[in-house]
Image: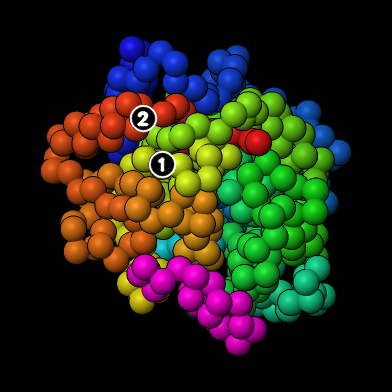
Amino acid sequence: MMDVSFRYRREQITLSAPDSATVYRTSFPAPTGPAAGAVLDAVRAPLGSPPLAQALGSKRAGDVVVVVSDITRPVPYARFLAELLAEIESAGVSADEILVLVATGMHRPSTPEERAEMFGEAAECCRVVDHRAEDDSGLVRIPGRSRAGSEIRLNRHFVEAGFRIITGLVEPHFMAGFSGGRKAVCPGLASLQTVQDFHGYAFLSDERASNGVLEGNPLHDEALSVARVAGVDFSLNVVLNSERELVRAFAGDLEAAHEAACDFVRGAACPPVAEPADAVVTSCGGYPLDATLYQCVKGFVSCLPAVRAGGRMIAFGSCSEGIGSTEYAGIMRKWSGRWREFLADISRADVFTKDQWEFQMHCRALEKVGQENLHFVTGGLGGDDLAHLSVNGHFAEAGGVRAELQSLLDEAAASGSVALIPDGPYCAPLA
């Protein structure tokens, strides 16, 4: 037997698995130095762009807006944001001309406590604003349309900025191929109407809307088209290893920097699947990704290439913040046990509800293994909730999650082959 450690909340859960089990892991290198040093090196020697300080010489009238990810992405801004802001100021930009804009997308705004955790000392010395997709007064329609023909409404601060810098984490993404780059703008700073195609039924029904795929991926193409129309002056993409350490930074042109980061991540986080297993065990990434069921769905979908059709999936996440948004919780309850009817309903052109996209992706897991075989273990949601979430739910009291998982793993291993994905959706096996 071998011991394999998985992330759950801010902790590690260690399970014993047969020596014959397949373990899919990322293979990122160790950091070569402090995060701030890697970021400064990247912005001073960027791809397809002048160095950041030089590029700021073409700043228009208005703020320098630095777009950052929200709490659902474990970007270690506290280790480099202050230094990045100092680099901007070194170009003659005053501190009061800099705005940090949190690209929440359709997620909730950040709390003061989260900002302190995310940004460290920078939270005390810079203006921070959250994007609010539902606030019409904070949105501006810009000329042009997206690739799919949608009108584009984006955050007012971003549109009116004198210089636009986007930042993000590049990792496998279960819809858009990879995160980072253009996603900071769409859906990060967009209105719900602007992302209707991006997260719509037709796009997510395309088999290319999947981990590790950019070419022909309709979500990638749509988001990139919006970012191009909006205009990005400089970008920064960071890559983390399984210890959440910053191992690489890619800066410069919107597309060149993102493509380089994706190539690097594909080689380290997308191991090939030789033979799908009878059962797969995956975390949902630990905090902050496993804080809601909404985010845990990424764990369900990312492990699908590693399990055979009709096989067994054993996933787990804390759900410490519950199910997700009010809209998402309503969708899950309304369509509990009726996922095929749900898909038929949202396929109609006149139907679009915020967060429907997450259950549509969840349905990929239901189609491949079935609800009875989609085991989900959590200490954050009780039996009544779990009964309406289209999973085979297992509630475990505090301290009991490991025992419940070990029991499920032992049962699966006794009857067939097993695959383990300790990093959850941060590792995306590809068939």
Of residue 103 and residue 427, the one placed in the foreground of this image is 427
The answer to whether 68 is drawn above or below residue 387 in the figure is above
Of residue 330 and residue 230, the one placed in the foreground of this image is 330
- Residue at the spot x=36%, y=61% of the render? 390
Which label lies toward us, 2 or 1? 2
Q: Position of residue 355 (x, y in %)?
A: 48, 68
Indicate which disc residue 304 carries: none
Is 352 magenta? The answer is yes
- Residue at the spot x=52%, y=51% of the render? 368
**Label 2 element class:** loop
| Image-based side of 5 in relation to 185, left or right | left
- Residue at the spot x=77%, y=51% of the render? 233
For marks 2 and 1, the one nearer the N-term is 1
| Image-based side of 134 in relation to 337, left or right | right
- Residue at the spot x=64%, y=84% of the render? 349
Instruction: State the extent of the magenta-drawn residues as a range.
Output: 335-354
Residue labelled with disc 1: 312
Q: Position of residue 340 (x, y in %)?
A: 49, 70
Q: Amino acid at mark 2?
A: Ser
